[in-house]
Amino acid sequence: MAVTLNINGEDKTVDAGEGTPLLWVLRDHLNMTGSKFGCGVAQCGACTVHVDGTPTRACVTPHDLLEGRKITTIEGANGRVADALRAAWEAIDVPQCGYCQAGQMMAAVALLETTPNPSDQDIDDAMSGNLCRCATYMRIRAAIKDAATRI
Amino acid sequence: MFMLETINSTAKPVSRAAPPVLVNLSRRGFLSTASAGSVVLGLSLAGCAREEEAAPEPEKSAAEEIDTDELGQEADIMGGDATPSLFLAIAPNGRITMTCHRSEMGQQVWTSIAQVIVDELDGDLDNVDIEQAIGHPRYGDQNTDGSTSIRNQFYRYRLVGGGMRTMLVGAAAAEWDVDPATCRAELGEVIHDESGRRLGYGDLAEAAAEQPVPAIEDIKLKERSEWRYIGTEAPSRTTPKVIRGEGTFGIDVNLPDMVYAVIAHPPQLFSKPSRVDDTGALQTPGVLRTVRLPTLEPPAMFKPLGGVAVIARDTWSAIQGRFALDIDWEDGENADYNSDAFGEALQETARAPGKEQSNKGDVAAALENAAQRITAEYYAPHLSQSPMEPPSATARWTGDKVECWACTQHPQAARSTVAAVCGVPEDDVTINVTWLGGGFGRKSKPDFIVEAALLAREIGQPVKVTWTREDDIQHGYFHSVSAQYFEGGLDADGKCMAMLHRTVFPTISATFEHGVTTPSAGELHLGASDNPFDVPNMRLETGESSAHLRIGWLRAVCNVFHAFGVQSFADELAHAAGRDPRDYLLELIGAPRMFDPTENGAEYPNYGRSLEEYPIDTGRLADTLRTAAEMANWGRALPEGHGLGIAAHRSFLTYVATVVEVAVDADGGLTIPGVWAAMDAGTVVNTRHTAAQIEGGVLYGLSNALYGAITAENGAVVQSNFPTWRLMRMNEAPRVMETRIIESDAPPGGVGEPPTPPAAPALANAIFAATGKRFRRLPIIGANSDRLDLSDAQDA
């Protein structure tokens, strides 16, 4: 069933099975591989994208419910907050393997969009759904605080 | 991990003592990006080349282009094929291309190797492109494991950079008709100060390619004080891509006409389907077909597990199709494996006298005469490496040849195993190495790559195999479960006079040789036979144990449980002696000296290096311990419910000490206000990324110690995904973490693994300091609780 999705400002028509999660439509049908598969059950956050600005686990979100919504992935994350986060991430080299970092950054963008000067508790609340096996948590926290000063 | 070379020689071992040989490869097309007029320098690992003599003919594209006359001379020097292992090229535009033969998995090896080579080259690090090498014996040791990339190759990398610099300087001197000794190189230029002339490396490349390759002894390596990049914070070469969602991990590979596979693996190791009904799977939208994989026969090695693959037009359809498979599995030889009962049996084995592995003095008599005897037992469960990117591989056959793309730590083992299982020559297998979304030892095992190769051949189409998280957690190569037993004897002054250590665990060897029940020297030297305590009577014993899952290596391997046992027991002895744990640990480590485990009868491999080059230096261990204690302000007054714990451990030729502060409330709620870790890794190439490895390595250890347990019932792993296999999250991470890299001129040690082992005992010791409760069984909290069970732990 053909479905038209607005992804990073562009309309894309895909023909995936009913109920196929957005993650697999992005990765397997559109070859947009920036959003990652980590668990498939919304427990790790590696697949985090924004739907109308809200961080959303693409691995459990049926793509066919998203017509007319604005989907943003790491490839299309732009603007002052995303730019500040990228600058901070780069300045202190947050990533190790990098696999979870698209999800981390999409969660952090959403946090700073609503909370420009987050406390440690705000960071815990916003980021605890995103696992990192390299355990870059110390640098993620520092980079979010650094990004807040750059906006 | 080093084990592979000794247990399962699928990769050609590399003689590390053999001298490297430089080879000029200009205009031979070794690098796809090297254009005409480039100078290309290769580095051969001579020991590896000797191994290759009996191997099938070298890769054709290389063999056809090698000038045999020229290489014949090289071959005489080194006694074999001189096909080089590492390439460095400079193009006419001055751009430097480095072929990285090690896998990038977050340790920033693309950055660190480039730093070393370009430093000696006197190039500009901002002017370097990286090509990732395919898996091939010509690259020498590619097994990115055992924290070896820098520690085993540092000198060779410097030679290749220095060798090319020598040729560039020679070309410039010839152009100017001056003595090369009057020229110098700096940031991609050769400069003749007397005349003020300078030429860029790009302009010199073509002429440099005609220069004689310098003999190793004629390459003047820089003094330490002259290093520009080694020992600095050079930024990551991968981060700029990562933050934009770019870069290709194994799971990101996409080929034309590719289909997607997910596999129903046998729930027990060495079981197989007795009945398969794929009707439901084939009716699932998007599913194309199913394929039965060959049954796995022991030993497991790196072969696929067997099972039934579902092939579909996307990953989701394949996952849904797998749900719809109806399979009855036969019980196999591991059907009775229940890890709880097995763990009790392990502990029982550890209580009985075992096989002597090393001995000093007379422990039995010393314990008999001790003023105070202390006994303690420790247990640690199986763990899963669980990199965030699960195993994934893509394969495509063209005629009788197969090309694979995969996130592999060990591309040569992938090549040889794909060849062996598919029954084709190794030269017909190409392994392209992607980025790895974490490895931690799991991706040294290429079983998943073989699955992709088998399926692609069967269906005649390119296929990507994706392991779901459930596959990763239930069907991996698990960190071994272990039981340890300690007895210590103190004299009337509290001094430790005797220590007995027994360790019992299923051995990694069983994965490669079915039925092996005794641990190898290579496992025992990971924190047991190398215990340097200055105790007059010491004894190490082992017991036998069978393996019922695939046992593999996980970051720091047996060091993890051995450090937990030894460093927890040291804390227990300190408490029994009524002494401060830091002071007592320093006393156990003793005066600065070089400890040689073979003096106590141990077989001691020392991570493949000599004790002359890399001694067990108790002075460095003690210094690291003192540094961590100072960083933590050890001895300071702490708030109610807080405690500090300390541990120090040498592994992979590097010394790490860690202090953990915990805060425990009356209900057992635990937080970690701070962690302080000091590392002496000898010469460090990148201080920023080494600090990151300390941070990540410590937290990897804390996460596993707090929450990690893989258990089995009736042969099948119980945990399935992140709700039941638990990892540390942001809100559980320490609020403060300070790291320090101790400055040292010693040869480089490992970096990726050494930070992990001290974490668990420092944590348990801190909890004891805070609560008076000793946690001797891991995990300390587990997957299903949000707090310590203070009633459950044994009182000290």
Image (spheres, helix red, strand yellow):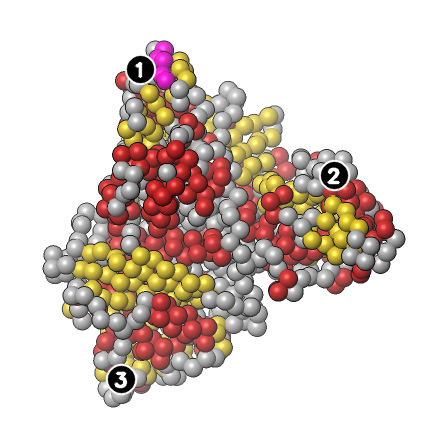
Residue B657 tag number: none
Q: Give the main secondary structure, helix, strand or loop, of the magenta stretch.
A: strand
Which residue carries the number 2 mark? B92
In this figure, what is the number of numbered marks? Answer: 3
Labels 3 and 2 share a subunit = yes
Amino acid type at mark 2: Pro
Give the distance between the C-alpha atoms of the residues marked 3 and 1, in whole angstroms: 74 Å
Read off the chain for label 1. A
**Kind of element beneath mark 3:** loop
Q: Would residue B668 appear left or right of B660 to someone viewing this image? A: left
Q: Would residue A4 appear left or right of B182 to someone viewing this image? A: left
Read off the chain for label 3. B
Segment tinted magenta in the rendering: A2-6
B310 vs B46: above or below: above
Q: Are marks 3 and 1 in contact (CB under 8 Å)?
A: no
Q: Residue at x 39, y 41 (%)?
A: A150
B199 vs B431: above or below: below
Residue B494 tag number: 3
Residue A67 tag number: 1
Relative depth, front residue between A134 and B353: A134
Relative depth, front residue between B258 and B387: B387
- Return the x and y of residue A135 as percentages of the image width and height: 36, 49
